Image (spheres, rainbow, N blue to C red):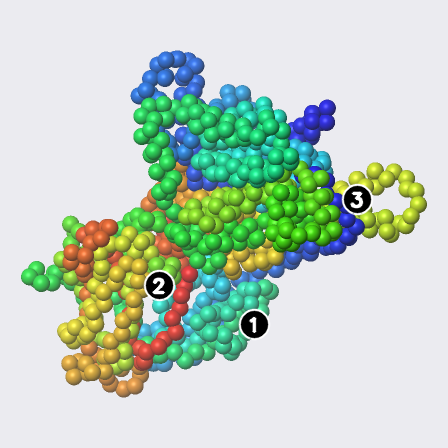
């Protein structure tokens, strides 16, 4: 019954967050890759419909290859969901733009992610932990940003967190191993990041296995069935459900692997340097996290980790270390008490350790390998759900301290409605602790990638540090107002870093005025957009040369940090063209 | 996660203060953002003040056609550089020659539109001679003692004689034309202007013109884009360059081009027909500097029609800058041509303060 209630609350959280994302989605212009994924997703979805209509004809090898060769460097599930979503919304007559309809699976996925985080928090501690963890995750500005996009990043985080949850449950109930296997298959069908999940679970399982026999989980669970299922069902599902791999499987599989092993690197600014290729700074992930995750949440997470430090070390390891340090002789009484407590109250699943490993693994991976960093925080977004869980533990610690303060202030004696008082205190503390994150996210949208925490001076402080302001050219919401003002009777726009496919998506949704067309020819465009990143100063300079002037007609900024400049061609159709 | 042992510590309550402090800091960040009106008022002040200074220092001799043009002008920069688009928007009029100059040679003063307490790095911590605040935007003025500039080859490129050929080919003239500007985008690299020298209609890429280039350090510089082609020399010749002081310059390739690891590029400086400097640029080296003392060439010069530097009659000398692609040096990219960009000017002495426009 409790479990059902947990899921009901989780579902409520998921629906609320999804609704918030849907409402705020139109403010966020389509990002570069969204345009590609939406077009390809529509193609995939049409094929699925064709399978139902035509049967075997649609399954002909050549037909399958023709459809699924597009963007075969990434697994198909997210794109298929984007396409099916748009198709379903269109068919249902729901008043929703095509852009938002394509994004809907990610937004629902983000809601589901909060659901799982809530349930995980509720299972490992209590509902307050779950609620706070879900709220903290939802209110991280970069999470909120990526939760909107028709891209794979939030969906693969969802799939990996769900797999981790299922693996964790499988340590107690073997039937969850099947769930872990199936969910991991979906993770592999979402993005290649999923391939990096088993090592961290294997390390965790190794700590369970290393425990003395009498401290281990029951014998039936000594084999990591969850991981076994993942490593067998997962790849099988990938091949079975990815039509591109149905023919010439080995060769295409190798192509897929090669693409990611030899992935090109795109430039990204970090700490005053634009990084074009590895080796990247080892502190990239940590530095990005410190400057973009609201500081209160980070401090709470640290408090949470410190608070749970004893649970983070497997009892057998703690005992071993102490024996080594104290020698084989008599163990001091104080240490014996600690050791006894550790063993006695130990969690046989080493849950804290699993969460810590899951938090650190994406960061360690990015910090120690040649993995791409061009997408900023999205490359280690998988760490954030676990960060939020530790932040929730920190919150409980703060709430408890406040309850203590209240009791001390009030003095001894009976109290009316103690539960109400406790809940009131906890609610107030939670609201205050989440307020900075909520405020930052609300203020940053739709420029979350340009936003940095107040600790470093906000967006201007981030710019001073030489941090990235954007990528994928999605920051067009306010640019559209400039375009409407400048080109009331139509004209051409050089869309800068916004891909033509993304621009077309804006046109289809009616965001771009009729008669305003994108052009790849900067020199002849009536308006030129430059999405500010240091390496795009080249495009600024081209506009200066083409127009004979270095003065833009508009600059879109976030907290005084330029995000997009708009130049008008002298003699062109823009209203400001003749004024300079 | 099992339940943690009970503790009585109350210090975690302090974290609420951390949250409140973060919230207040967030509000402070928002409140500290300069308004567009602050930018406009500061820019208006600079426009007025620097125009008045220009009128004061302008002398009759400066007006002669071959005199140092526009020397002793002030330069306006925006600090920090990331705010430059807002500064240019507020200034409303920024001449291309004053956008991203390579250094401060010939500048009388430096004005900075500054926010967040930033000062121009080129001033190396010196105190401004004047400072005014307009809301959140400050105007700083620095009087500077830079080498005087008598001839900026970039500014004079449209008066140059441009030719192509070399070796057994002989030399053909390149004509200054007004051609359509096409293309653009990150992959396009350096773009040549509409007014450019075109050498061969069948090879439209063989051209010369004043432009901007973002080098491998991502700094943008005003410069002359001059094709370096395999087997062809392209020459920009300036027949009447003041023969006193030093010819100092830099040349390089667009950062995207340099990353391609293509063939090396040569730049040669000839003074009065004599080869005086030969610089080889290898990809990854960034903008390379070159300098040629011009004093020793006075014997091969001819009388000037003007009076450079306002110091009486002087001699001028013929300066030619050639570009070419190194033969057989192709690496990953073995194309027929590349587009280096050079900047150079004659100044009274070496050591002008460089500006990195990013």
Name the chain letter of the residue that bears numbered label 2.
B
Task: Give the secondary structure at mark 2.
Answer: strand
Alpha-carbon span between mark 1 and mark 3: 50 Å
Mark 1 surroundings: few (<14), some (14-19) or many (≥20) residues within 10 A:
few
Same subunit, labels 1 and 3: the answer reads no
The disc, 2 or 1, on the residue closer to the chain's N-terminal end is 1
In the displayed structure, B22 sits above or below A264; it is below
When asked about the image quadrant of residue B117, the answer is bottom right
Query: Which residue in the structure is indicated by mark 2?
Result: B221
Q: Position of residue B195 (x, y in %)?
A: 26, 58
For the C terminus of chain B, the image quarter is bottom left
Is A525 in front, or is A203? A203
Q: What label sits on residue B132 in the rendered view? A: 1
Of the residues tagged 3 and 2, which is closer to the observer?
Answer: 3
Task: Give the secondary structure at mark 1.
Answer: strand
Query: Which residue is at a point 34% across and 60% down the rendered structure image?
Result: B215
Farthest bottom residue in view: B312
Mark 3 surroundings: few (<14), some (14-19) or many (≥20) residues within 10 A:
some
Asked if marks 1 and 3 touch (Cβ < 8 Å), the reply is no
In the displayed structure, A301 sits above or below A512; it is below
Query: Which residue in the structure is indicated by mark 3?
Result: A425
Same subunit, labels 2 and 1: the answer reads yes
Alpha-carbon span between mark 3 and mark 2: 60 Å
Query: Which residue is at a point 45% across and 25% down the rendered structure image?
Result: A237
Same subunit, labels 3 and 2: the answer reads no
């Amino acid at each position: 019954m409790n479990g059902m209630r947990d899921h009901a609350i989780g579902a409520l959280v998921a629906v609320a967050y999804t609704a918030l994302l849907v409402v705020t989605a139109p403010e966020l212009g389509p990002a570069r890759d969204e345009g590609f994924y939406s077009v390809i997703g529509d193609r995939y979805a049409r094929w699925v419909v064709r399978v139902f209509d035509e049967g075997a004809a649609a399954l002909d090898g050549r037909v399958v290859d023709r459809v699924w060769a597009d963007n075969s460097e990434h697994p198909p599930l997210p794109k298929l969901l984007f396409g099916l979503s748009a198709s379903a919304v269109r068919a249902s007559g729901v008043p929703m733009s095509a852009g938002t309809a394509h994004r809907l699976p990610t937004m629902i996925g983000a809601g589901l992610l909060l659901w799982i985080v809530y349930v995980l928090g509720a299972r490992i501690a209590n509902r307050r932990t779950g609620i706070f963890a879900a709220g903290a995750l939802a209110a991280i500005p970069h999470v909120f940003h990526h939760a909107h996009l028709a891209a794979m990043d939030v969906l693969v985080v969802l799939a990996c967190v769900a797999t981790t949850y299922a693996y964790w449950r499988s340590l107690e109930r073997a039937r969850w191993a099947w769930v872990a296997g199936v969910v991991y298959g979906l993770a592999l069908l979402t993005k290649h990041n999923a391939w990096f999940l088993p090592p961290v679970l294997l390390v965790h399982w190794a700590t369970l296995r290393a425990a003395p026999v009498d401290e281990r989980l029951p014998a039936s669970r000594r084999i990591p069935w969850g991981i076994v299922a993942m490593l067998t069902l997962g790849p099988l599902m990938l091949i079975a459900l990815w039509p591109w791999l149905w023919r010439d499987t080995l060769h295409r599989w190798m192509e897929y692997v090669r693409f990611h092993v030899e992935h090109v690197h795109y430039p990204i600014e970090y700490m005053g340097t634009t990084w074009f290729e590895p080796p990247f700074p080892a502190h990239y992930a940590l530095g990005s996290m410190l400057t973009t995750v609201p500081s209160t949440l980070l401090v709470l997470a640290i408090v949470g980790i410190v608070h749970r430090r004893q649970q983070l070390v497997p009892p057998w390891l703690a005992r071993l270390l102490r024996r080594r340090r104290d020698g084989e002789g008599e163990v001091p009484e104080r240490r014996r008490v600690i050791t006894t407590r550790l063993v006695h109250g130990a969690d046989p699943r080493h849950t804290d350790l699993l969460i810590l490993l899951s938090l650190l693994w994406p960061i360690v991976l990015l910090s120690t390998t040649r993995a791409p960093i061009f997408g900023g925080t999205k490359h280690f977004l998988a760490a954030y759900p676990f960060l939020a869980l530790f932040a929730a533990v920190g919150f409980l610690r703060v709430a408890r301290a406040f309850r203590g303060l209240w009791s001390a202030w009030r003095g001894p004696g009976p109290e009316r409605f103690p539960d109400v008082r406790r809940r009131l205190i906890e609610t107030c503390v939670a609201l205050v602790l989440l307020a900075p994150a909520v405020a930052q996210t609300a203020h940053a949208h739709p420029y979350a990638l340009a936003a940095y925490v107040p600790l470093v001076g906000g967006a201007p402080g981030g710019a001073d540090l030489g941090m990235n302001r954007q990528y994928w050219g999605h920051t067009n919401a306010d640019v559209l107002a400039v375009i409407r003002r400048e080109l009331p009777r139509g004209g051409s726009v050089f869309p800068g870093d916004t891909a033509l496919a993304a621009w077309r998506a804006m046109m289809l949704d009616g965001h771009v005025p009729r008669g305003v067309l994108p052009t790849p020819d900067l020199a002849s465009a009536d308006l030129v957009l430059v999405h500010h990143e240091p390496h795009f100063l080249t495009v600024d300079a081209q506009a200066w040369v083409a127009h004979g002037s270095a003065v833009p007609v508009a600059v879109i900024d976030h907290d005084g940090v330029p995000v997009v400049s708009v130049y008008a061609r002298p003699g062109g159709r823009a209203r400001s063209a003749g004024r300079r | 996660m099992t339940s943690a042992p009970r503790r009585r510590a109350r210090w975690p309550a302090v974290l609420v203060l951390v949250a409140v402090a973060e919230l207040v800091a967030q509000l402070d960040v928002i409140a500290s953002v300069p308004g567009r009106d602050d930018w406009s008022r500061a820019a208006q002040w600079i426009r007025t003040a620097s125009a008045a200074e220009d009128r004061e220092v302008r002398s009759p001799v400066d007006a002669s056609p071959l005199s140092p043009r526009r020397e002793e002008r002030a330069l306006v920069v925006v600090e920090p550089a990331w705010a430059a688009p807002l500064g240019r928007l507020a200034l409303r009029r920024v001449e291309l020659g004053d956008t991203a100059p390579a250094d401060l040679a010939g500048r009388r003063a430096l004005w900075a539109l500054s926010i967040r307490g930033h000062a121009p790095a080129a001033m190396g911590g010196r105190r401004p001679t004047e400072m005014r605040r307009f809301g959140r935007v400050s105007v700083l003025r620095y009087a500077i003692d830079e080498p005087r500039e008598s001839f900026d080859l970039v500014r004079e490129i449209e008066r140059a004689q441009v030719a192509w050929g070399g070796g057994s080919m002989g030399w053909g003239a390149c004509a200054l034309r007004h051609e359509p500007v096409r293309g653009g985008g990150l992959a396009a690299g350096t773009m040549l202007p509409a007014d450019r020298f075109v050498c061969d209609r069948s090879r439209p890429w063989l051209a010369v013109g004043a432009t901007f280039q973002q080098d491998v350090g991502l700094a943008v510089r005003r410069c002359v884009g001059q094709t370096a082609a395999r087997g062809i020399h392209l020459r920009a010749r300036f027949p009447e360059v003041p023969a006193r002081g030093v010819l100092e310059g830099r040349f390089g390739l667009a950062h995207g081009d340099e990353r391609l690891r293509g063939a090396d590029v040569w730049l040669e400086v000839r003074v009065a027909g004599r080869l005086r400097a030969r610089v080889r640029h290898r990809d990854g080296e960034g903008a390379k500097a070159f300098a040629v003392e011009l004093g020793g060439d006075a014997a091969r010069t001819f009388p000037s029609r003007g009076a450079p530097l306002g110091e009486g009659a002087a001699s001028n000398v013929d300066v030619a800058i050639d570009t070419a692609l190194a033969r057989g040096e192709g690496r990953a990219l073995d194309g027929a041509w590349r587009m280096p960009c050079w900047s150079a000017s004659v100044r009274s002495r070496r050591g002008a303060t460089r500006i990195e426009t990013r």
